């Protein structure tokens, strides 16, 4: 039902349209498998119009829906970068570290907006914490840690509460 909300569609569509201007269709296949426990998900571009996201069953079982959706958003952005690179024959190396730098500087806010639209009761500070998931070690991440260590540590604690065995969020079965 929330996926039909015009605002949600616009937030997600804006992000995708900016990345895939002129392209008619991009399919996203979502599957589950066991990956290393340190990895919540993995993305693979099958071709310029098909992105495959594998959610880590071992790491996400018992996690919150909010964490899983933020992980999907993060992985969809990886897929958009990879598919766009493939389509444009871009010679620039778009490895994961580079993609994370771009995400941390330009895509956290759209992820936070999407999370708060999908989960209207999600407090903004916790949506921000989830939106920063997986972006550890980026310049923006390190700047936050240095500029306001107390707020930064609170953000880490907020995000952790949505993981397996913790209290916040809507738990998956």
Image (cartoon, rainbow, N blue to C red):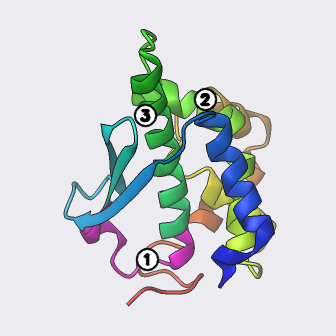
Q: 10 Å neighbourhood of mark 3: few (<14), some, or many (≥20)? A: many
In this view, 152 is above or below 105: below
**Front residue of this view, candidates 97 and 32:** 32
Q: Residue at x 75, y 75 (%)?
A: 5
Query: Who is closer to the viewer here, 17 or 80?
Result: 17
Circle 1/circle 3 CB separation < 8 Å: no
User: Residue 47's spot in the image, x, y percent?
Assistant: 31, 37
Task: Tell me which label, 2 or 1, sits earlier in the chain.
Answer: 1
Task: Identify residue for label 1.
Answer: 63
Q: Which residue occupies 42% across, 32% down?
A: 82
Q: Residue at x 25, y 69 (%)?
A: 58
Q: Quadrant of residue 83?
A: top left
Magenta-span inclusion, residue 57: yes
Can residue 128 be seen by looking at this rendering?
no
**Magenta part of the protein: which range?**
55-67
Residue 100: which disc? Answer: none
Disc 2/disc 3 C-alpha distance (Å): 15 Å
Mark 2 and mark 1 in contact? Answer it, CB < 8 Å: no
For disc 2, the marked residue is: 102
Label 2: few (<14), some (14–19) or many (≥20) C-alpha neighbours in 10 Å: some
Residue 81 drawn at (x, y percent): 49, 33
Vertical position of residue 68 compared to residue 101: above or below: below
Q: Quadrant of the N terminus?
A: bottom right
Q: Quadrant of residue 54?
A: bottom left
């Amino acid at each position: 039902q929330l996926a039909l909300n015009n605002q949600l569609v616009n937030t997600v569509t804006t992000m995708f349209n900016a990345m895939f201007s002129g392209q008619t269709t991009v399919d996203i296949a979502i599957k589950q498998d066991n990956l290393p426990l340190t990895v919540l998900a993995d993305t693979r571009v099958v071709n310029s119009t098909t992105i495959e996201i594998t959610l880590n069953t071992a790491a996400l079982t018992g996690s919150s829906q909010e964490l899983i959706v933020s992980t999907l958003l993060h992985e969809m952005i990886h897929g958009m970068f990879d598919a766009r690179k493939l389509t444009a024959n871009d010679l620039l190396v778009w490895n994961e570290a580079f993609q994370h730098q771009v995400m941390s500087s330009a895509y956290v806010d759209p992820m936070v907006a999407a999370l708060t639209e999908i989960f209207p009761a999600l407090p903004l500070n916790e949506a921000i914490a989830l939106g920063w998931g997986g972006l550890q070690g980026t310049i923006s991440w390190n700047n936050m840690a240095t500029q306001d260590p107390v707020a930064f540590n609170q953000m880490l604690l907020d995000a952790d509460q949505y993981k397996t065995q913790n209290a916040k969020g809507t738990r998956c079965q």
